[in-house]
Structures are given as structure tokens and as C-alpha cells.
Amino acid sequence: MSKEKFTKKILCIGAGYVGGPTMAMIAARCPQYKVTVVDINEEKIKAWESNELPIFEPGLLDVVKEARGKNLFFSTELEKNIKDSEIIFVSVNTPTKTFGEGAGKSADLQYWEKCARDIRSASESDKIIVEKSTLPVKTAIAMERILNENERGLKFEVVSNPEFLAEGTAVKDLENPDRVLIGSKETESGLKARNEIVEIFSNWIPRDRLITSNLMSAELSKLVANSFLAQRISSINSISALCEKVDANVSEVSRAIGKDSRIGNKFLHASVGFGGSCFKKDILNLVYLCETFGLYEVAAYWESIVKMNEYQETRFVQTINKALFNTVTNKRIALFGFAFKANTSDTRESPAFYITKKLMEEKAHVVISDPKAIKNAKVDLKDFNNKIEYEIDPYKAAHQAHAIAIITEWDLYKELDYEKIYNNMERPAFIFDGRNILDHQKLFEIGFNVYPIGKPHLIHFNES
Ligand code: NAD
Ligand code: UGA
């Protein structure tokens, strides 16, 4: 297809976990559009142009290859690409602010606002700007104000299209989403812009899954969706602590309550705690928003979900320390998994980081194993210099270890030969299953002392 035949020219600013996969899917499903993704990070752009993509995501390389070089392009040239495009998705990072007012809770909007100003200064024609990043409510309005304060008389319409993909299943989620949400102003020009975005997704997504709303509802729905998902995990994790006290089994409780169709069975998997770049950030964003409007009880309610998650991580480390006779000093402890969940190399806000840090403070000898995330783990843990060992092979990681802690639910950990592992470990040998993915009775019979989450501990001696 020649360049002139492209019916829409789409640009995405930000080639990260969202921008890259989302644009690859749009390009693959809409060969009639030209899709360009720009980023300030040259290395990342080079990786998107290669077969070693900057992120690990099952099935993503195939989707990228379907479109790359035909109607999907990666570039570091911001200005020219802004000029050339009609629709610009902005998918830059919006981390929690670490300084000044709102530090620790509100979103740091500096990258976001820079994009607005770059778009304004480079544009020579009217454009639709799509808010893809997750942002505080009313950011779209603020962006529109900045953009429309231009001397060329250009008109910008800002549409909110929050992303709901989860890492590890991004391709599946983009291909077949539960819904796509598109919010706009309900003016004539706002509705026209909304329809342009609806048209993009209707190329492969049934119309009844394309939901529209006003701008603020769309922005708020994203924060609320993540907060509700995290709330379910914190709820079941809080119950896991009680289960351990009363000899109940949290998986049985999850199954029993999840069968109630009003509750539903998803996101009820007790764990070492939720991680990822967004849950904590987005809940805190919601908390800050509530505080800003004086809704302190509402803010405290949502903040408790983050506190419960921190409690669960702390509890996990305390269990390890207590089981290992109140000292982990100089003991080799193998962490199986560093990614915040399976099927991703992403380690942002992974419980593994907190657990490693706590074990290092106790002067344990920590060995980190992960099939995909060791590179990121090394960056995260650079302050510990050479004190941490990294070993991709779980058998070697567990060799002569006192304990194994399962942090990430990678399938490969379910299939290991634990008898072989046990035979090469120090005695007594311990296993802490932070994801409840292993056969605990079998491990106990092999000889391990087994500590699942929210289930009775299986130990070969009396626990005092
Ligand atoms: P990311 O850090 O992986 O990617 C953001 C990219 O933006 C980076 O590569 C960065 O270099 C680039 N960038 C920043 N400023 C730029 C600028 N001025 N010009 C060009 N490039 C610039 O972040 P992400 O995980 O893709 O998240 C992006 C947004 O999407 C966030 O708001 C996040 O909350 C939201 N979100 C993320 C996920 C997820 O699974 N990661 C899911 C849904 C929504
Ligand atoms: C989450 C949401 O699921 C996405 O809809 C959203 O778009 C995204 O955040 C975002 O805004 O960034 P993600 O963080 O990639 O996606 O992954 P999840 O599958 O939601 O898992 C988050 C964390 O919760 C992981 O650490 C996971 O292991 C943990 N989890 C999940 C549990 O501990 N128990 C569960 O039952 C489910």
C-alpha cells in the first residue's frame, strides 16, 4: 500500500508497555492506517525495530512483525511526526510524584505536560489528542486548555481512551478486550472526535464493547477499575492471614465465595502481594483526588488497600524469618521469580523488591532466579552492588540453599523436580510458596517444611 492510500495517520508518543503493544495491534488490524510510535529513548526505539523487543510479552513479536515496515513505524523524531499526524495518542509514563505538593500520592504530570507543549509547538493543523496514559480526573480538560492556547488558531480536541490491558496477556487483551472506553466532551466537535476513535477500534472489536462516556467519567473509571481489582486482592490477602490462624484454607474460601455469581471468581488469588507499575500508583491517585475534595473517609477507605498490601509483603518476610529460627543471616535463600507477575519481564513495584531488601537487611545471602526479569532485577537492586547472586537456573539457585521462596507464579516453577532440589539443599529445607502454585502435600512428603499463603503450614517439627 502506498503512503498516499493511508486513510488515517496516527502517532503515539511513548513506546512503553502500553504504547508499543497498543499501536502494534491497531496497525496489524487496520492496514489502511499509518501508525508511528515515537519515544525519547533511542535504545527502546531500536529494540522495537529489532526482533529483541524492549518488553517481553507473549505473542507480541508476531503482531509487531505483521505490520512493522508496512504501516507500523518506530522513530525518535517527534516534531516531524507530530506535524504529519491527524490523531495523536499520548502514552507516556505518569508515575507517582516524589517531590513537592502531593508527593507520594498524586501523579507526576511533567512528562504528560511536556507532550502537550511539544504537540502545540510542532502542529500545523487541527488534531485529535487521545489520552492513553492513566491520569487524574480533569487532566484532559487541562491539556485541551494548553493546546488551544496557540497562536495559529489550531483546534485540538482531547479524548480519553484509558487502557485496560494487563501485562503478560497484553496481546490477548488488545485483541479481545472486555471493553474499550472512549470519553469525550459532549459538544459537536467532542462527539465528532469520539466517533473518529470509535471507528479505529471498530475495525476488530464488536460495537457493543465500545463504550462511550463523558471525559471525566472515562478518566475516573480507569482509576476505579484498578482500585477495585486491587481491592479484591487485598481483601482475599487479609483473609489469608486469618486462615493461617484458624486452620482454614484460603483457596477453599476463594472457591466457595467465588462461586457466588455476584462475587465472581477472578482476582481472588491470595498472594505475597500485588505489584506492577499501576495498582498502587492509581489507588494513591484516587486517594489524593478524594483528599483534594475533602473526602477524607473515602480517601482512607481506598488507602487501606495499599496498606493491606504492604502488610502482606511484611508478613511474608516475617514468616520466613520466624521459620528459619529467627535468623536468616548468611543463609542462602533462593527467590524463584522477580517479575511482578508471570509472563512479563516487568519488575516495577514487584513484591520481590521489598522482600529482597528486607532479607538483605537481615544479611541473608539472596539468590534471585527468574526466566525473564533478571536484567531488570539487576537495575532495581543496583544499590546492593555485588552482594546479591543472580542465577537463571532454579536448580543452581536452590543448590545448598536453606530456603526457597516462590515470588512469581511462572509455570516453570510448578514443573521442577523438587525431589532433586531437596536433595541438594541444606537441612532442614524450607519452601515458602508466595503464590500457592505448588503441590504442598507432595513437597512435605519429600521432606520440605512448607509455608503456603493462607493455608496450614506443613512442618516436620513442632512450631513454637
Ligand atoms: P512506560 O514507562 O513503559 O512507557 C512510557 C514511555 O514514554 C517511555 O518509554 C518514555 O521514554 C516515554 N516518554 C516519556 N516522556 C516522553 C516524551 N516527552 N516524548 C516521547 N516519549 C516519552 O509506561 P507504560 O507502562 O507504557 O505506561 C504508560 C501509561 O499507561 C501510564 O500512565 C500507565 O499508568 C498506563 N497504563 C499502563 C499499563 C501497563 O500495563 N503498563 C496498563 C494500562 C495503563
Ligand atoms: C492491571 C490491570 O489488571 C489492568 O486491567 C490495567 O490495565 C493495568 O493494571 C494497568 O493499569 O497498568 P497488571 O498490573 O499488568 O494489570 O496485572 P494484573 O494481572 O492485574 O496483576 C497485578 C498484580 O496483582 C500482580 O502482582 C499479580 O500477581 C497480582 N494478583 C492478581 C494477585 O496477587 N492475585 C490475583 O488474584 C490477581
Image (tube, grey):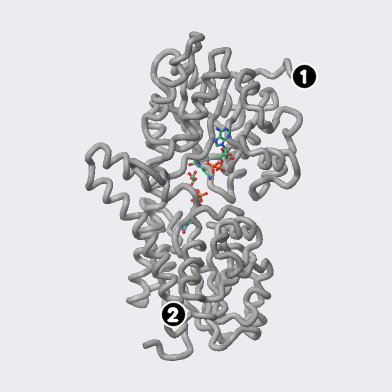
Kindly give the residue lying farthest to the bottom in the view shown.
461
Work out whether mark 1 precedes mark 2 in sequence or the reverse, and give the earlier one. Answer: 1
Q: Secondary structure at mark 2?
A: loop
Question: Residue at coordinates 25% horizontally, 46% vertically from top-left?
Answer: 298
Query: Looking at this view, is 199 or 22 the one in front?
Result: 22
Give the x, y percent position of residue 442: 56, 80
Q: How many marks?
A: 2
**Circle 2: residue type:** His
Quick check: 402 above or below 231? below
Q: Quadrant of the N terminus?
A: top right
**Circle 1: residue type:** Ser
Q: Residues within 10 Å of mark 2 (few under 14, many from 20)?
A: some
Q: Quadrant of the C terminus?
A: bottom left
Q: Residues within 10 Å of mark 1 (few under 14, many from 20)?
A: few
Question: Residue at coordinates 55% horizontally, 65% vertically from top-left?
Answer: 384
Kindly give the residue lying farthest to the top in the view shown.
153
Give the CA distance from mark 1 to mark 2: 65 Å
Q: Secondary structure at mark 1?
A: loop
Residue 387 visible (yes or no):
yes
Question: Residue at coordinates 67% horizontally, 44% vertically from top-left?
Answer: 60
Residue 175 visible (yes or no):
no
Residue labelled with disc 1: 2
Residue labelled with disc 2: 457
Residue 147 tag number? none
Query: Looking at this view, is 187 or 352 the one in front?
Result: 352
Image position of 103 (left or right of 365):
left
